């Protein structure tokens, strides 16, 4: 689900757009699917979609695009951090 379906240039989502997003998330879950929100750029977007039950998010808030080699480094760092907290 692209976040533009919810925001489209405004700071706060329009009530109808929020209802459509929530309904889409609920429909996907009722079909046994996971929902990934695309294009998440702000904490507000992430918080709202998380509260709506969105399963995963991707976008500039999570990470900027990187070359493949840097991606491996990024994933390895994340794995090491998880091990440190285990």
Image (cartoon, grey):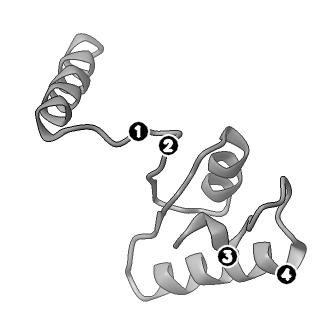
Q: Earlier in the sequence, mark 4 or mark 2?
A: 4
The nearer-to-camera label among 4 and 2 is 2
Q: Earlier in the sequence, mark 1 or mark 3?
A: 3
For residue 21, the mark is: 3
Q: Circle 4 sits on which residue?
A: 16
Q: Is residue 28 above or below residue 11?
A: below
The nearer-to-camera label among 1 and 3 is 1
Residue 16: quadrant of the picture: bottom right
User: Which residue shows up at 82% across the image and 64% down it?
Assistant: 13
- Of 36 and 5, which appears nearest the observer? 5
Q: From the viewer's perspective, tell me whether residue 83 is left or right of residue 36.
A: left
Q: Farthest residue in the front direction?
A: 67
Q: Circle 1 sits on which residue?
A: 64
Q: From the viewer's perspective, tell me whether residue 33 is left or right of residue 43.
A: left
Residue 61 horizontal/vertical position (percent): 53, 39
Mark 2 vs mark 1, CA separation in Å = 5 Å
Mark 4 vs mark 2, CA separation in Å = 25 Å
Q: Earlier in the sequence, mark 4 or mark 1?
A: 4
Q: Earlier in the sequence, mark 2 or mark 3?
A: 3
Q: Is residue 25 above or below residue 43?
A: below
Residue 69: quadrant of the picture: top left
Label 1: which secondary element:
loop
- Of 22 and 29, which appears nearest the observer? 22
User: Disc 2 vs disc 1: Cβ atoms closer than 8 Å?
Assistant: yes
Residue 33 horizontal/vertical position (percent): 38, 78
Q: Residues within 10 Å of mark 2 (few under 14, many from 20)?
A: few
Q: Circle 2 sits on which residue?
A: 60
Q: Residues within 10 Å of mark 4 (few under 14, many from 20)?
A: few
For residue 34, the mark is: none
């Amino acid at each position: 689900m692209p976040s533009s379906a919810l925001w489209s240039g405004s700071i706060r989502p329009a009530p109808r757009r929020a209802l459509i997003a929530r309904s889409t998330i609920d429909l996907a879950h009722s079909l046994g699917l996971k929902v990934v929100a695309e294009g998440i750029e702000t904490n507000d977007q992430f918080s709202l979609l998380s509260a709506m039950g969105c399963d995963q998010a991707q976008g500039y808030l999570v990470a900027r695009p990187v070359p493949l080699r840097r991606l491996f480094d990024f994933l390895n760092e994340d794995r090491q951090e998880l091990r440190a907290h285990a």
